[in-house]
Image (spheres, grey):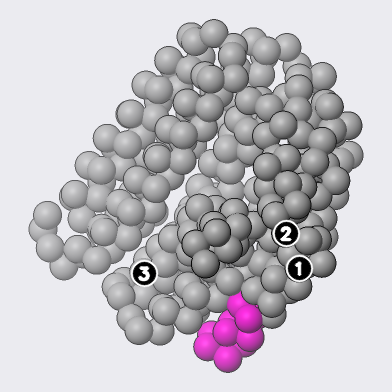
Amino acid sequence: MLKWLSILLELTKFKISLLATLFTSAGFILAHHGLSEKMALPVLAVLFLASGACALNQYQERMIDRAMERTRGRPIPSQKLRPSTALWISLAFIFSGLMILFSGTNTFASGLGIFAILWYNGVYTYLKRWTPFAAIPGALVGTIPPAIGWASAGGTILHPQFLALAFFSFLWQVPHFWLILLSSGTDYERAGLPSLSKVFTSNQLKRITFIWICSTAVLALSLPLFHLTRALSGNLLLLAGSLWLAWNAIRFLKSAPESTSFQWAFMKLNIFVLWVISSLSLSSLLKGSPL
């Protein structure tokens, strides 16, 4: 039982799927200015949709994963799971997520869920085979979970507060994806995929990634200007997190251009994103408090 659970979590990229649900929760809380029992359904729907999309992506890229050192241990290339089984699991998750959206939210939120699947599995997955810059249009998918949460709470996605949140959820993903590519550049070349290392030198890549990371920190620092934080504690948390990320970005820029430095930067960027969405959510929940 534990073995199958481990395979399922790996197939659905549970950590990534969980992060999507956290963004959905943040979108709902910020639009609703608090918690509500209505939040459960969109959050569960996004968890299922993200899990299904990740599983379907592994089915689509099973031959590529087999050629890469970083991914050959995944359930399909390692033969822990048959491709047909993985496909049916992915479709079951996607179907369940869409049904929950249609029955428990509104038409617009449901449409966003469909768009996310089409863009991630129908566009981004194949765009990676054509250009090393696929992460930029691919990052658009990251704006969907908070949009679903926001729309499910009755908010409009044209509101300046949501646009600021969406831009942050878009921006941080570009260095996130690039750091993965940079730490496994030879893997991508071995699999026949376009690699950033073929376009830029190592030092150029570090400087470009440094700019993306610093831009993410600056954007997070500007979120209070859009009144996304409603308590002093939230502003202080964002300030501390942004300064911490900027400091680590400088250390990353000065480090040797090795895969370990990219992996450390990747981990710290993810920690920062968790810090930001937690700070925003907490601030909204404490909106009535002077703290």
Indicate left or right for 157 with 186 as reference: left
**Most prominent secondary structure in the magenta stretch?**
helix
Q: Is residue 227 above or below residue 133?
A: below
Label 3 residue SS:
helix
Q: Amino acid at mark 1?
A: Thr
Residue of label 3: 29
Q: Residue at x 80, y 41 (%)?
A: 66
Report if the CB atoms under discs 2 and 1 are less than 8 Å apart. Answer: yes
Residue of label 2: 81
Indicate left or right for 96 with 210 as reference: right
| Label 3 Cα neighbours within 10 Å, binned few <14 / some 14-19 / many ≥20 | many
Label 1 residue SS:
helix
Report if the CB atoms under discs 1 and 3 are less than 8 Å apart. Answer: no
Q: Amino acid at mark 3?
A: Ile
The region drawn magenta spans 96-106
Q: Residue at x 75, y 73 (%)?
A: 88
Q: Nearer the viewer, residue 45 or 175?
A: 45
Residue 133 magenta-drawn?
no
Label placed on residue 254: none
Residue 99 magenta-drawn?
yes
Q: CA distance from mark 1 to mark 3?
A: 36 Å
Label 2 residue SS:
loop
Q: Is residue 43 above or below residue 166?
A: below
Label placed on residue 85: 1
- Rendering quarter of residue 201: top right
